[in-house]
Amino acid sequence: MRAAAQDSGPAVGVTPAALEVIRRLESAHGPLAFFQSGGCCDGSAAICLKDGELPAAPSDLLLGEIGGAPFYIDADQYERWGTPRFLIDVAPGAAEGFSLEGLEGVHFVSRAP
Amino acid sequence: MSIVESTAYAAPGEPGSLVELRERYENFIGGEWIAPITGEYRENLTPTTGEPFCEVAHSGAQDIELALDAAHAAKDEWGERSPADRAAVLNHVADAIEENLEMLAVAESFENGKPVRETLAADIPLAVDHFRYFAAAVRSEEGRISEIDAQTYAYHFQEPLGVVGQIIPFNFPLLMAAWKIAPALAAGNCTVLKPASPTPWSILKLAEVIGEIVPPGILNIVTGPGAGIGKALASNKRIAKVSFTGETVTGRLIMSYAAQNLIPSTTELGGKSPNIFFEDVMAADDAFLDKAIEGLVLFAFNKGEVCTCPSRALIHESIYDEFMARCLERIRAIKQGDPLDRETMMGPQVSAAQLEKIEGYVKIGRQEGAEVLTGGGRPELSEHLAGGYYFEPTVLKGHNKMRVFQEEIFGPVLAVTTFKDEAEALEIANDTLYGLGAGVWTRDGSRAFRMGRAIKAGRVWTNCYHQYPAHAAFGGYKSSGVGRENHRMMLEHYSQTKCLLVSYDQNPMGFF
């Protein structure tokens, strides 16, 4: 795992609404970690897991923290996406994959700030 | 007054509908409908209007255990059945689906949003054929014998794994279920299957159709959230294999669970498939050109919610203007609307989340400087569809370094660019993290072959696209996943090799 170089401002931010969900999930499940996904179906979503559920790989880049939880992205993916900034928001409708907020009927959204 | 005959099917549950609708659906476990131990249900929406139309079980980890109990209770008897018996069950399943083809096509269309003309002509007939294919494949399996020496022989048998876990995506709920269920059962396994959260219901309609044909416990279906039951299934010590189609982080998670339990996994994780049009496609204005134009417009098939969506069109610069003009004309003729209408060519996206994501990517594309050639927003449709998740077929012109060329949008959004020669076409085609599908269009057979071999993707359609016949292996290179489906080699993915090493020599080895 590597830390992202930041030229100005955080590479990943979070909306107050998403922060509130993160707080709630943390009290229910303990420490959390985010992984920016890609690929089919609900690819492009930020997947929220219990910290340690998926060990960060050497090729994962630590982009920053949101609500105290580390936010990772695959380094190749980050480069190919043009090293964008992310704003993590939340919206109604259950997450479609294994992301924890799906249990509460909502899903995190990776927006371009 | 003339009576105009409606071209639309009645929605499930409405008077005259082919599809009977219950208010609430339970899990299908051990051949019976079992209420979730959680006691919880959730509303299931149709993307057509965004309205709920039934409730499905919101199961938990204990429900997965129940399903695994049923599967384990059935596995020995099923695994010991003769291939002929297992094939007969699969053929019976295929016949039952075929007899209910129209009903299942309407159910699938209503829940997923894909147009019924696709489910009638592709999804359901392909599912039928898939069961027949694996029935035939397992009948024709044979082991190998190795002659070690004149008195020593190795006999190789394929034996079932036991109980497998299968997690299917929302884009082809019934067809992807068939792709996973048919080889698993043919090879003598029992399965516990989790449908995707946005599309849990059509497969329960399938269970109503085939529930009495399959022996109890060999096929078990549990609905609920991925974070609850998906994990409970994929990380369970009582499965012998896990199969998953979805996004990359969950794919990694599935493979890490499999590693922890020392079991095999297969994953299919999507792509950003190039569709390449060489200058000679326009050498004549004929049926082939017409086919190539349709080949480009196939990005809108299943509203772009296809892992192999031909989402990057690479067009030779000398034909770009004329070819693209012909394609845009065809794209603008796409009829959007109620997916249950037989004349509809594109229905709604599967969920509000998908719609938001697609809108987000079109915005990102504009910010990156891509030119919107057509579409780009939500269409204006009749009032009763206002709550549905519709998006226009959209074409963005740009270059391959843009994010909209690199990430799978999973919607009806085509990114188009030009190339100057074969080498550049190949370079752009392979400049992606993924390698699931690709298309090559040319009248030059040698070039088609060269390109097909050089593109790093598991499936290269040559002068065609979006065909999924059984007996043609499907799966990814690079980050698109590990394993293949849709081919008899799946029987090996769903079995393990037993070697009986037999000596016919009467004499000792002489060591002790």
Image: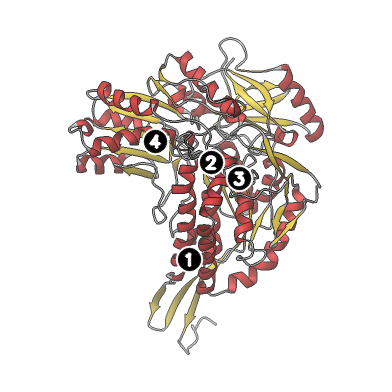
Disc 2 residue type? Asn
SS at mark 2 in the image? loop
Between discs 2 and 4, the one toward the N terminus: 2
**Same chain, labels 2 and 1:** yes
Disc 3 residue type? Ile
Disc 1 residue type? Ala
SS at mark 1 in the image? helix
Between discs 4 and 3, the one toward the N terminus: 3
Q: Which residue is mark 4?
A: B298
Examine the rendered structure and indicate whether residue B460 appears above or below residue B127: above
Viewer-side residue, A65 vs B241: B241
Q: Quadrant of the C terminus of chain B?
A: bottom right
Q: Chain of mark 2?
A: B
Question: How far, Cα to Cα, is label 2 from label 1?
Answer: 25 Å
The quadrant where residue B200 appears: top right
**Same chain, labels 3 and 2:** yes
SS at mark 3 in the image? helix
Closer to the eye: label 4 or 1: 4
Q: Chain of mark 4?
A: B
Q: Position of residue B79 (x, y in %)?
A: 59, 70
Closer to the eye: label 3 or 1: 1
Question: How far, Cα to Cα, is label 3 from label 1?
Answer: 29 Å
Q: Chain of mark 1?
A: B
Q: Which residue is mark 1?
A: B135
Q: Which residue is mark 2?
A: B171
Dot 2 and dot 4 residues touching (CB under 8 Å): no
